[in-house]
Amino acid sequence: MPTLFLICGLPGSGKTTLAKQLEQTENALRLCPDEWIEPILPDPNNRQEMDRLRGHIEAIQWELAKRSLTLGIHVILEFGFWSKQEREYFRKEAEKLGATVRLFYLNAELDELWKRLEKRNANLPSGSFHVKKEDLIEWMQVFEPPSAEELS
């Protein structure tokens, strides 16, 4: 039975690190929107264009994920999954396809996230973007951590 792995967390929480580990241990297809956006985004500082592209890229990746799941391939989505509604949607859709779903929540406090992001910002790896502290603070306000029930 194929598994959909949902990687939930804010920037700097370790989503990509975990997803890359799961990619190897679970022999899964890993889909990371930032890695697809980066090569087609002319100006990496244009947050509005990045957000516009993200919606399209995530939609394409979800179509690829659904097809892969129907073929029996495990899939990892690194979408962040900031809202309970989003997590529930992907869980229900994957279950309709006969897949199991595993949610991984990577939690870290603001100071730890910012420490990691400062380090990453200083030497950006391919497929990642510079994050400002004020953006991180704003995102923390809208992020809905998964409940214990969601994680079980």
Image (cartoon, grey):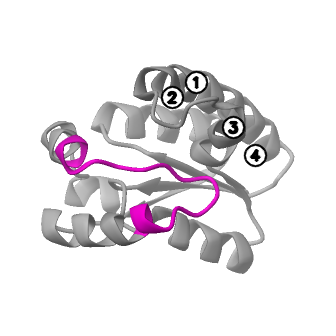
Q: Which residue bears the numbered disc 4? A: 69
Tell me which segment is drawn in magenta: 120-136
Graded by Cα atoms within 10 Å as few (under 14), some (14 to 19) or many (20 or more), the crowding at tag 2 reads: some
Does dot 3 land on a helix, a strand or a loop?
loop
Q: What separation in Å lies between label 3 and label 2 (alpha carbons)?
A: 30 Å
Q: Is residue 47 left or right of residue 61?
A: left
Q: Are marks 1 and 2 in contact (CB under 8 Å)?
A: yes
**Kind of residue sitting beneath label 2:** Met
**Kind of residue sitting beneath label 1:** Leu
Mark nearer the N terminus (3 vs 1): 1
Does dot 2 land on a helix, a strand or a loop?
helix
Q: Count the marks: how many?
A: 4
Q: What separation in Å lies between label 4 and label 1 (alpha carbons)?
A: 24 Å
Q: Nearer the viewer, mark 4 or mark 1?
A: 1
Mark nearer the N terminus (4 vs 1): 1
Q: Are marks 4 and 3 in contact (CB under 8 Å)?
A: yes
